[in-house]
Image (spheres, rainbow, N blue to C red):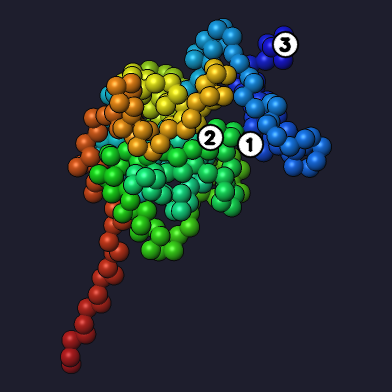
């Protein structure tokens, strides 16, 4: 493939089809055509310096601080439907892919060691992930808590919702994150109409979070576990352990900060009213007939 100069996204997709979750080798093992055990094709795509440069050039571009603040400014943000507002905030503070956000269940919001967390899982009906390392538990950022995220989830549970985003259809042509991507792209087109041209979208929120964590000094192993990335270093893959929810949130003492280091400068108090269900509108009462 590389001899034929296949594009790097193609290589990524091939890795997913062959070694990824639900890929060829997983099917072969489940069907008895290949011995059960470690997936021999998992995590074996590596990129040359040139290919990495190409991926950076043509991949999604992260938002800078001013762009994040513009996208989440109340006057612009209220144009999004309520569910899409929450989806965008989850993307911004967890780095989750649109498909991962769209398939979330109310049961995926859990406590781990006393820390509210979001699980990216493949255990529920119609849930799937890109690769095994995509399965992860991400602490809920303090900003999301301040915005009433847990209250919103609890309200959905009280209403009998199993899916956090009922608008995300399991049989959608482009996946369960399609509606989120479309809604956010329309929002982006309006807010960013005068920005320099670049490849941007919902996925840019993921890249923004990764770069913000990197800039804040969060170590690569911790970043990888937060966003579900495979580490290139075989030593880390073999010998590293999973970080606790507390470590993911607060970091490793004297070594690295954690997810809570994120600070986008968004006005939380101004956003708070936009994240609550509006009260049901009352039908105007009919005028009483005058007695004759």
User: Which residue does the numbered mark 2 point to in the structure image?
Assistant: 134
The residue drawn where x is 38% and y is 27% is 209
SS category of the residue bearing label 2: helix
Q: Residue furthest top?
A: 50
Above or below, 10 relative to 156: above
Which is nearer the N-term, disc 1 or disc 3?
Answer: 3
Quarter where residue 210 is shown: top left
Please name the residue that numbered disc 1 is placed on: 21
Between tags 1 and 3, which lies in front?
A: 1
Return the x and y of residue 150 as percentages of the image width and height. 33, 51
Question: Image check: 290 left or right of 201?
Answer: left
Dot placed on the residue nearer the N-terminal end, 3 or 2: 3
Quadrant into which the C terminus falls? bottom left
| Residue 187 seen in the figure | no
Quadrant the N terminus occupies: top right
Q: Can residue 260 be seen from the camera position used here?
A: yes
Residue projecting furthest to the right: 33
Give the SS element for disc 1.
loop
Q: Nearer the viewer, residue 218 or 280?
A: 218
The residue at which mark 3 appears reads as 4
Q: Give how far across and how far down residue 65 sits, in percent.
A: 29, 23
Packing grade of label 2 (10 A; few <14, some 14-19, many >=20) is many
């Amino acid at each position: 493939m590389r001899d034929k100069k296949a594009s790097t996204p193609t290589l990524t997709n091939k890795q997913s089809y062959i070694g990824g979750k639900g890929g060829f080798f997983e099917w072969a093992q489940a069907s008895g055509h290949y011995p059960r055990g470690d997936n021999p094709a998992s995590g074996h795509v590596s990129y040359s310096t040139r290919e990495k440069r190409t991926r950076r050039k043509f991949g999604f571009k992260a938002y800078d601080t001013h762009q994040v603040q513009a996208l989440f400014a109340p006057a612009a943000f209220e144009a999004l439907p309520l569910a899409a507002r929450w989806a965008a905030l989850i993307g911004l503070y967890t780095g989750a892919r649109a498909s991962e956000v769209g398939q979330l269940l109310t049961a995926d919001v859990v406590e781990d060691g006393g820390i509210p967390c979001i699980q990216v899982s493949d255990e529920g009906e119609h849930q799937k992930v890109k690769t095994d390392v995509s399965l992860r538990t991400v602490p809920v950022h303090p900003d999301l808590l301040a915005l009433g995220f847990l209250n919103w989830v609890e309200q959905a549970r009280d209403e009998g919702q199993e899916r956090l985003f009922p608008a995300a259809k399991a049989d959608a042509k482009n996946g369960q994150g399609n509606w989120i991507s479309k809604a956010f792209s329309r929002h982006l087109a309006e807010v960013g109409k005068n920005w320099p041209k670049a490849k941007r979208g919902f996925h840019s929120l993921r890249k923004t979070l990764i770069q913000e964590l990197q800039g804040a000094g969060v170590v690569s192993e911790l970043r990888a576990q937060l966003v579900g990335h495979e580490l290139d270093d075989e030593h880390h893959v073999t010998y590293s352990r999973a970080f606790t929810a507390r470590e993911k949130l607060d970091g490793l003492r004297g070594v690295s900060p954690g997810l809570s280091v994120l600070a986008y400068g968004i006005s939380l108090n101004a956003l708070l009213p936009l994240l609550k269900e509006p009260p049901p509108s009352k039908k105007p009462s009919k005028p009483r007939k005058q007695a004759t």
